[in-house]
Structure formats: structure tokens, C-alpha cells
Amino acid sequence: MREFNAVVLGAGGVGKSALTVRFMRGEFVENYDPTIQEEYRRSIEVDGELTWLEVLDTAGAEQFTALNELYITSGRGFILVFSLTLEASLREVTSLRQQILRIKGESSGIPMVLVGTKLDLTNEREVSSATLRELATRWKIPVYETSAKRDWDVREAFEDLVRQMREYYPVEPPKKKKKRGLRGKSPCIMM
């Protein structure tokens, strides 16, 4: 079974933990309790293939900038989270994406999804679907509008990231063991 790790990044209070816990445990966390760092691990079946997925739920990006570099360096896939009810949180995700590209040293293709949370709070929405479509096209990454409370499109976002990681990090063939022989040398026999 293949194994991947994903890092959940975004501003504080946008619903990173609610999204992560909904996916990893199937529960909705009602109360906001600022996270410093939480790790979750579970198997997930995507397209008939089982995968171990480790998800690192991080603190708000503005709170622990130095740690973000460490998370990004070790991460293989990224879930960039913002709140559909807070336009400023989308700007934070823009900054995080630039940081990922700088640290990873690549212009595109890094497994990444953009996730807007709190879709169920329609009266408080500040970020339009049109803005997200334009951003998805420009960044060439998928965008999901989710609700952890209602469990809308949460699993789909994580499954998409797993598919991207499978493609971006292909299976490496097993390494051949070197034969330890004497290669033309006479054996030494001790008595």
C-alpha cells in the first residue's frame, strides 16, 4: 500500500481543523480551538486502490511562519484552505501557494487543492464562485467549495489530492540487491 502525507495550510479560523477532522474521523468539530499541530493517519480507498494518508493540520499561517517552511519542505501534497465567508483568507492562501512554489523549487504540478470552507453559510459569503473558477484556471489546480458541518465535498477534495500525489510520485521499482560475490578473486579459507 502506498503512503503519502498532506499538509493543510491556511489562515487561522478558516476551518482547517473542522475540514480535517470531518475527513479523518467523520465528525464535525463545532467549537473553535486554535491548533498548533495535529497529525492524523488513515487508509483511504480511491479508485479501488488503498492508500495510507497522513494529514498534518497546521496552525494559522500567520501565527507560525517559521514552522510553515518545515511543513512545506516535508509535505508531498497540500490542501490550501480559506473561508468562503472571509475574502482576506483567500489572499493568505495566495501567499502560501507562492511559498510552496518557492520552497519546492517548481513552477507547477505540485499536488495541491484549493478548498473554500463554510459553504453552508450562504448569507455570509464574500468569495464568489466566479473568482474561484478564475483562480483555479490561473493556478491550474482544482477548487472545492466545502462544508465540514454538512459534509459537502470534503472527501472529494482529499481524494483529488491523493490522485494527484499518485501521479506526481510514481511507484518506484524495487531496488535490485547487489550480489556480494568475490568477482574473480580466490576465496580465502581459514582453518
Image: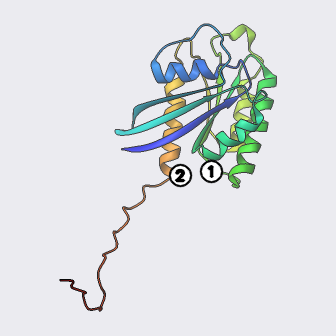
Q: Quadrant of the N terminus?
A: top left
Q: Amino acid at mark 2?
A: Tyr
Which is more N-terminal, label 1 or label 2?
1
Secondary structure category for the residue under label 2: helix
Identity of the residue drawn at 71% across and 37% down: 68
Side of 100 where 180 appears, left or right? left
Around disc 1, counting alpha carbons within 10 Å, would you say few (fewer than 14), some (14 to 19), or many (20 or more)?
A: some
In this rendered view, identify the residue nearer to me: 73 or 190.
Answer: 190
State the residue position of label 2.
168
SS type, badge 1: loop
Q: Position of residue 190 (x, y in %)?
A: 21, 83
Q: Which residue is mark 1?
A: 109
- Rendered position, 92 above or below 124: below
Counting from the top left corner in percent of width and height, residue 149 is at 56, 11
**Quadrant position of residue 97:** top right
Query: How far across and how far down the image is residue 22, in percent?
Result: 51, 18
* 6 w.r.t. 33: above or below: below
- Measuring from the top left, give residue 188's x and y in whole percent: 25, 87
Say which quadrant the C terminus sits in.
bottom left
